[in-house]
Image (cartoon, rainbow, N blue to C red):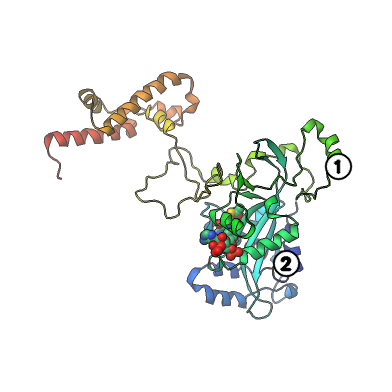
Amino acid sequence: MGTCICDLSLLGLICSNQRMWLTRPSCFPAVTSGRRECTVLKRGVAKVWVPERWGRKSDWRSPSVDLQQQIMTIVDELGKASAKAQHLPAPITSASRMQSNRHVMYVLKDTSARPAGKGAIIGFLKVGYKKLFVLDDREAHNEVEPLCILDFYIHESLQRHGHGRELFHYMLQKERVEPHQLAIDRPSQKLLKFLNKHYNLETTVPQVNNFVIFEGFFAHQHRPPAPSLRASRHSRAAAIDSTPAAPARKLPPKRAEGDIKPYSSSDREFLKVAVEPPWPLNRAPRRATPPAHPPPRSSSLGNSPERGPLRPFVPEQELLRSLRLCPPHPTARLLLATDPGGSPAQRRRTRSASEEQVLSQAGSGEEHMHTVSPQAQALPAQAWTMGGNIFNARFIRNLQDLRSTRPW
Ligand SMILES: CC(=O)SCCNC(=O)CCNC(=O)[C@H](O)C(C)(C)COP(=O)(O)OP(=O)(O)OC[C@H]1O[C@@H](n2cnc3c(N)ncnc32)[C@H](O)[C@@H]1OP(=O)(O)O
């Protein structure tokens, strides 16, 4: 793939459709700035870049370089805005990612009611063909290469105005696909509702990967046979099968098998790796109130993962194992010995400890499970502050109970 962003099919799109082309990059970030929207749109309009003027020296000192840079900036800004709207920790659409993938980005621009040839970006839709293994309704694996919806964003102030539909419809026509032939990469609730409303897509076929497909997906899909038979049966199938071809792959040549990661080919996978620091830094703080944006999850998705911020997750077992490395404070041991029943919290802790003991006995060969380095294990007991703190706190509380010295 070359470095020129023209390869992204963006320019073809820009030239081929009057309604879908790009403004100068300074326009879009301004559009996203909330209440200043009207002013900003006007300001954006004043700076709008029109295709006919690409070559004008006054606009572009070095058109080829500037043009590339401008479009890259726009793509980056669009990606950021989309990530923000979806509460993703990092953009999944960027110029550099576009350059390394064969994705196509459809950009919707508003030209109406603006001075001639000027406008602002309304939103975008990113699609691409991906090799996937998907389950059908009999839970059989199918190797397919459908067109996937990878990213979709309409500016906040313009959502629910039909722009999304317009953009989607345009893409369907250009790509010559039916909505039920698409695979969707971790759709948001909004997108699910959108698809349901405009295309009656409701019943999903449960998958084990991040993609969502809908009933009817397999209606016209080629089902590749077993690899050993693939070559001969493919040609036979082509001769026999007169059904209209599903969105069979039509863009890139076949990649080396090593490049294909069927179960991790979601564009969003990298987010997990990118944002999650190592334990214990990945422990999410406890929240008294629910998060402002609860991670949306489709009830009909089955195992489709959450789209919200990829909240770090520490399994309880791992926590227990780590506690093994935190011997209780000596004074706490005394308390534990003298207080066998204790409060429910106490019992929980005791149970954890006994569970811990079991783990400890059973886990002699599972050192690799530990997240604490051997150096950390070698630290003196007083350095293990976590368990010590817990028991110290309890010890002090019990002491205060006994002495009635608590101020409340
Ligand atoms: C694979 C992926 O890309 S998943 C990511 C999808 N993108 C996002 O979630 C980003 C935030 N959302 C958006 O950008 C937009 O809402 C889109 C792209 C999903 C839809 O674009 P819009 O221009 O709003 O769609 P359009 O106006 O054509 O259709 C509206 C319908 O979409 C759905 N919809 C749009 N916004 C919402 C919302 N806030 N809540 C619930 N449903 C919504 C509804 O079905 C709505 O119909 P209704 O108003 O009668 O209830």
Residue 79 appears anywhere in the view: no
Kind of residue sitting beneath label 1: Ile
How far is the residue under mark 1 from the one under mark 2?
39 Å
Q: Where is residue 385 in the image (x, y as percent from the top left)?
A: 32, 34
- Location of mark 1 (residue): 240
Kind of residue sitting beneath label 2: Ile
Residue lying at 63% horizontally and 63% vertically, measured from the top left? 165
User: Can you tell which quarter of the image residue 391 is in?
Assistant: top left
Residue lying at 68% horizontally and 80% vertically, measured from the top left? 116
Q: Residues within 10 Å of mark 1 (few under 14, many from 20)?
A: few
Query: Disc 1 or disc 2, which is closer to the eye?
Result: 1
Instruction: Of the two numbered discs 1 and 2 on the same chain, state the one appearing first in sequence.
Output: 2
In the image, is 52 to the left or to the right of 295?
A: right
Residue closest to the eye, 173 or 7: 173
Residue closest to the eye, 330 or 347: 347
Q: How crowded is mark 2: few (under 14 residues within 10 Å), some or many (20 or more)?
A: some
The C terminus sits in image quarter: top left
**400, above or below 15, in the image:** above
**225, above or below 159, in the image:** above
**353, above or below 188, in the image:** above
Q: Where is residue 264 in the image (x, y as percent from the top left)?
A: 63, 41
Mark 1 falls on what kind of element?
Answer: helix
Residue lying at 28% horizontally and 29% vertically, measured from the top left? 347
Contact, CB < 8 Å: mark 1 with mark 2?
no
Asked if the residue at label 2 sits under 8 Å from ligand 1, the reply is no
- Location of mark 2 (residue): 14
User: Can you tell which quarter of the image residue 14 is in?
Assistant: bottom right
Residue 120 appears anywhere in the view: yes
The label shown at residue 24 is none
Mark 2 falls on what kind of element?
Answer: helix
Furthest-bottom residue in this view: 115
